[in-house]
Image: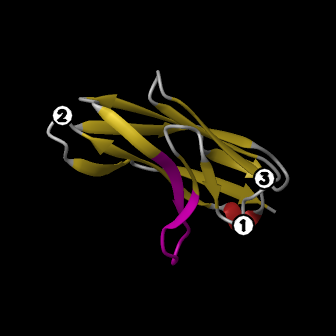
Amino acid sequence: QVQLVESGGGLVQAGGSLRLSCAASGRIFVIHDMGWYRQAPGKQRELVARITSGGVTNYADSVKGRFTISRDNAKNTVNLAMSSLKPDDTAVYYCNADHTNSYGIVYTYWGQGTQVTVSS
């Protein structure tokens, strides 16, 4: 079992910045891709950014140039630096990780989410 715990959400004014962090713990064997998703009220959960274990990144068009995803493989953490925030970025942000256990079983874990609210 792997646990993901996010931190760093909060309330910020439009144009401001926030940094989200996510730490994986538990019976970690191999973590592959890690990512951040978000879900606004009444909307489906959507991809924000993902990063492979080798550092290759992928961003949603809506956040390109404003958000930066990074990870520390040694510490099993993934971060999301958000700048030039807009009210449309308001959502619950979820961390996820694709994990392979010692039996070769792949499972995607999710964190509990952290609220980001951007006021206009």
* Residue 97 on image: x %, y %: 40, 46
Task: In this rendered view, identify the residue nearer to me: 66 or 15.
Answer: 66
- Inspect the magenta stretch and tell me whether residue 50 lies in it: no
User: Which of labels 3 and 2 is toward the front?
Assistant: 2
Image vertical order of residue 74 relative to residue 95, above or below: above
Numbered label tally = 3
Q: As drawn, which residue projects farthest toward the left? A: 103
Mark 1 and mark 3 residues within 8 Å of each other at the beta carbon:
no
Image vertical order of residue 74 relative to residue 93, above or below: above
Q: Distance between the residues labelled 3 and 2?
A: 37 Å
- Inspect the magenta stretch and tell me whether residue 42 lies in it: yes
Task: In this rendered view, identify the residue nearer to me: 88 or 77.
Answer: 77
Q: Three-letter amino acid code at disc 2?
A: Ser
Q: Distance between the residues labelled 2 and 1?
A: 37 Å
Mark 3 and mark 2 residues within 8 Å of each other at the beta carbon:
no
Tell me the residue that label 1 is attached to: 62
Q: Please give the name of the residue rendered at 68% of the width and 48% of the height, measured from the top-left corner.
A: 11
Task: In this rendered view, identify the residue nearer to me: 24 or 16.
Answer: 24
Q: Three-letter amino acid code at disc 1?
A: Ser
Q: Can residue 68 be seen in this view?
A: yes
Q: Three-letter amino acid code at disc 3?
A: Arg
Q: Please give the name of the residue rendered at 28% of the width and 37% of the height, measured from the top-left corner.
A: 2
What span is colored magenta in the figure?
Answer: 34-48
The circle on residue 102 is 2
The circle on residue 66 is 3
Q: In what element is the residue under mark 2? A: loop
**Quadrant into which the C terminus falls:** bottom right
Predominant SS of the magenta segment: strand
Horizontal side of 4 relative to 89 (left or right) equals: left
* Residue 69 on image: x %, y %: 64, 43
Image vertical order of residue 45 relative to residue 16, above or below: below
